[in-house]
Image: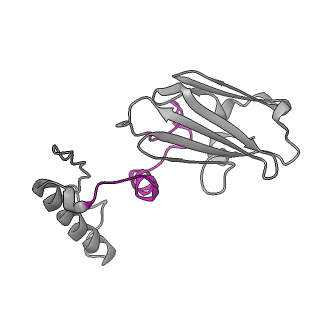
Amino acid sequence: VGDAKTCFGANGIVQWTQTTTTVEMIIALPRETTMKDIKIELTDSHFKLWTSWTGCVETLSGALSRRVKSSESTWTFERHSGELHVILAKDNDDTVFQSIFERGQGAKSHVEILSDFVHADEPYEDSDDLSIECKTLLEELKLRHASVVRGHTSIDDDHDFKVTVCFNENV
């Protein structure tokens, strides 16, 4: 399978994303792999992948960086594509994974994490139902985003750039 540097990332065999409630790993395995070749051990704090040809896959096994609900987590293997899909249910919806494992394998930057949440297909409140404070904050974020897009400022240079979640007390 390889080491952590070649395992994760755009050209690696493991891609992962997250939503507010789950973390999904897609692991590319050899096409000749069958269900009998795969074994997964999952607890609320550890994940371990075994294959018939390597035994324990060390780069994809170990203590998780955050707790999950193992009883609500699932995995499937798509034989035609050789992809193993692992969906880890987050223990707390407010939890953000910067990496899957405690050792930091596959760590993502803040921009990559934000991108995961932006592209997550999750229901959201209609902006008309947000509080005045949330609408004001949203407008400020839109203006800052526009400034970044135009090249007038950089997220890296703007130490005041914050991502904040607003809750509508009326909902």
Magenta stretch: residue 3 in it? Answer: no
Q: Residue at x 19, y 47 (%)?
A: 168
Left or right of residue 168, residue 74 in this image:
right
Left or right of residue 39, residue 100 in this image:
left
Count the marks: 0
Magenta stretch: residue 123 in it? Answer: yes
Q: Which residues are magenta?
A: 97-126
Residue furthest front as drawn: 171
| Residue 2 appears in the rendering | no
Left or right of residue 137, residue 27 in this image:
right
Q: Residue at x 13, y 61 (%)?
A: 136
| Residue 101 appears in the rendering | yes
Residue furthest left as drawn: 132
Quadrant hosting residue 72: top right
Q: Nearer the viewer, residue 80 or 107?
A: 80
Q: How is the image coloured?
A: one colour
Residue 27 location, x and y as percent? 69, 44
Q: Nearer the viewer, residue 7 or 130?
A: 130
Residue 40 location, x and y as percent? 70, 27
Residue 17 location, x and y as percent? 52, 48
Residue 115 location, x and y as percent? 43, 57
Quadrant hosting residue 32: top right
Q: Residue at x 26, y 52 (%)?
A: 163
Quadrant occupied by the N terminus: top right
Quadrant occupied by the C terminus: top left
Main SS of residues in magenta: loop
Q: Residue at x 85, y 31 (%)?
A: 36
